[in-house]
Image (spheres, grey):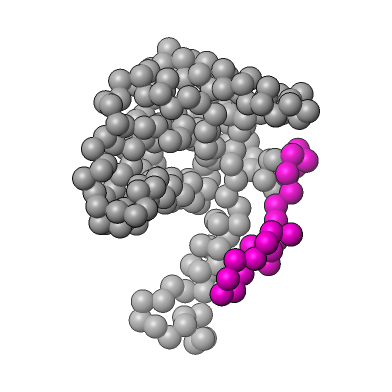
Amino acid sequence: MSESGETGAASAFSAAEIAGVYRVIAERRDMRHFLSDPVDPALLARLLQAAHQAGSVGLMQPWRFIRITDTTLRQRIHDLVEQERVATAEALAERRDEFMRLKVEGILDCGELLVVALPDRRERHIFGRRTLPEMDVASAACAIQNLWLAARAEGLGMGWVSLFDPAALAALLNMPAGAKPIAILCLGHVAEFYPKPMLELENWATPQALSALVWENAWQDDP
């Protein structure tokens, strides 16, 4: 590496820029606690553009972002999530009470609420999906991750909510047959970022070490 911190390649980033990329990845958090301050429209536009620049299989760009600005609609989305939260708690059986104590969303508090959906007529995209049709979901997830990282770099928090009935949310948002919501994103200002993933702080789960998830040449049994 040169004294300037560059790796030698003409297109390489500086050492400080590289460190910034790794920092934002390490400090990204799935946020549940938000301030109600509005998000600047220009900042929101930058974040959505970052999402839109994600890689996608066959350049199908299967992401659709629905910005929720109607307060009554926001409340109805919250109600859908609450219904699924209760149903999930019942399914967890012995961990029911523990789960019900967790804060799983910030829908009524965040500055911006977005729904990410897959469009209808996705079957026409064959390139890269003939044997793996789920690559539309994978591509949309890349866009969500871009948005998440860009938001963290800008000092905004984001939380991915997946506790909802897709059919009910699709009907609520007048989606055509074949379209499917895959995420509710709470986006906005926060008082502080969690020092660790919230579920780790709440003793709900412990992250696995990378060494347990990297194998060589063949499948290995999980520890």
**What x and y, as percent, mark residue 117?**
36, 35
Q: In this view of the protein, which residue sits in the foreground, 145 or 2?
A: 145
Q: Is residue 115 magenta?
A: no
In percent of the image, x 26 and y 34: which residue is there? 120
In the rendered structure, the answer to whether residue 69 lies left or right of residue 16 reads: left
Range of residues picked out in magenta: 200-223
Q: In this view of the protein, which residue sits in the foreground, 206 or 148?
A: 206
In percent of the image, x 67 and y 45: which residue is there? 197
Q: Does the rendering let one see residue 40?
A: no
Where 71 falls versus 175 (above or below)? above
Q: How many tags in the picture?
A: 0
**What x and y, as percent, mark residue 125?**
24, 49
In percent of the image, x 70 and y 40: which residue is there? 199
**What x and y, as percent, mark residue 190?**
58, 36
Quadrant where the image shows the C terminus: bottom right
Q: What residue occupies the far top of the structure in this picture?
A: 72
Q: What residue occupies the far left of the structure in this picture?
A: 124
Where 101 falls versus 135 (above or below)? above
In the rendered structure, the answer to whether residue 64 lies left or right of residue 77 reads: left
- Magenta segment, principal secondary structure? loop
Q: Is residue 201 magenta?
A: yes
Where 115 falls versus 49 (above or below)? above
In percent of the image, x 43 and y 47: which residue is there? 141
**What x and y, as percent, mark residue 169?**
41, 23
Q: In this view of the protein, which residue sits in the foreground, 13 or 177?
A: 177
Q: Does the rendering let one see residue 220?
A: yes
Where 2 falls versus 24 (above or below)? below
